Amino acid sequence: MFELKNVVRPNILTLEPYRCARDDFKTGILLDANENTHGPALSDITTYEELLELNRYPDPHQLELKEQIVSFRNQSPNKYSTSLLKPENLCLGVGSDESIDLLLRCCCTPGKEKLLTCPPTYGMYSICATVNDVETVKVPLTIPDFQIDVEGILAKLESDPGIKLIYLTSPGNPTGKLINVDQVVALLKKTIDTWNGLVVVDEAYIDFTASNGEYSESVSTLVNEYPNLVVLQTLSKSFGLAGIRLGITYCNIDLSRILNSMKYPYNISSLTSDIALKATSPSGLAVMHKYVKSILQQRETLLKSILDLKYVGRNIGGLNANFILVEILNKSGKPSNEVALMLYNTLAVDNAVVVRFRGKELNCTGALRISIGTEEENKELLLKFEKVLNEINA
Ligand SMILES: Cc1ncc(COP(=O)(O)O)c(C=O)c1O
């Protein structure tokens, strides 16, 4: 039976969060934090820079930003949601990469406990695991539909009691495929009775899944129903803000309190929160939705044209993200890592077009992953792609 106190490492459970005088007193002559009250060392300071008070430490709690994010996600909850998200469900990080690492450090004792991933998947899970001296065990996604193997995962949990975290990616990277919500819920229900660990669903690409407006495929609004669920999102993809580094962790309030006391108090900079507030305001959301719509249209156009090319095989993955995964063939019509790598290299070195070789990932032989660009970028990619691929296979 799931109990948070048996999931979180004992040293973290008893952690007292860092406190500063500013938690209690926010106004007046502030000489409590060894800041430089003369101001930021910027010549010709702009009004915008001045308003941000960059000589002051940023707010550790970011309540206004959390309220905006929660209100956006509550507008279209998951079809299984019975309660709404609150700002207390959130912990903000320096991109979701920080959240991935934070959860590992929260739950897995180095050299002892383990992480489970479902390849092919995002590479940072196992990199963070290795850095933290945490072993990664794998239960591959099913073929050819790239879904989770619920029974396989349950069998692995039973045979290996050291596993504390499961990292799922939905929509997947590099698969571009949404994990069926019913399967995620089935996994949550089955594990909550039998296992002390967390199911982490990384939804970096969730806004690219078609939604009917009323409900969303995101499981973020289920964290109050399932204390063993954690959801990660980011402003790096649909919001086009990879440069500001803002990741969002959604979880049950008890776990959120622990994560918030573990994080560095000032991890979200004043510049980041200011831009994130604009992006998650109603006018920012309208721009995000406009860009997503255009990316989805471009994805359809690009995929159609690329699949018509002579040495391009299948679209291996799904169409739920801002990229496509396609199979590159050799002269005999077989998926080929050799040809895919040559195409990747020649495009980058001689044609200034950079895509990603993913042929070494499990069940992705010959695969290139292509992010969807603007109409002009996609047209140029397509012309060069066809020319180089035909030359390689000539
Ligand atoms: C599945 C997945 N999760 C997380 C990230 C990292 O996101 P962030 O920029 O928020 O660190 C990526 C980036 O490519 C990703 O593909």
Image (tube, rainbow, N blue to C red):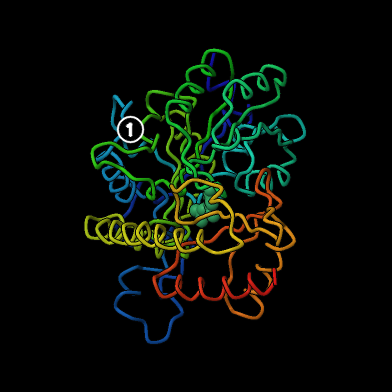
Q: Quadrant of residue 281?
A: bottom left
Q: Name which residue type carries label 1.
A: Asn
Relative depth, front residue between 223 and 373: 373
Q: Position of residue 244 (x, y in %)?
A: 45, 63
> At 28% from the left edge and 45% from the top edge, which residue is drawn?
72
Q: Position of residue 367 (x, y in %)?
A: 63, 55
> At 31% from the left edge and 57% from the top edge, which residue is drawn?
293
Residue that mark 1 sits on: 78
Dot 1 alpha-carbon crowd within 10 angstroms: few under 14, some 14 to 19, many 20 or more: some
Residue 94 can be seen in this image? no
Residue 348 can be seen in this image? yes
349 left or right of 75 in image: right
In the image, the residue with mark 1 has its CB under 8 Å from the nearest atom of ligand 1: no
In the orientation shown, which residue stands out farthest toward the right? Answer: 111
Relative depth, front residue between 119 and 72: 119
Q: Quadrant of the C terminus?
A: bottom right
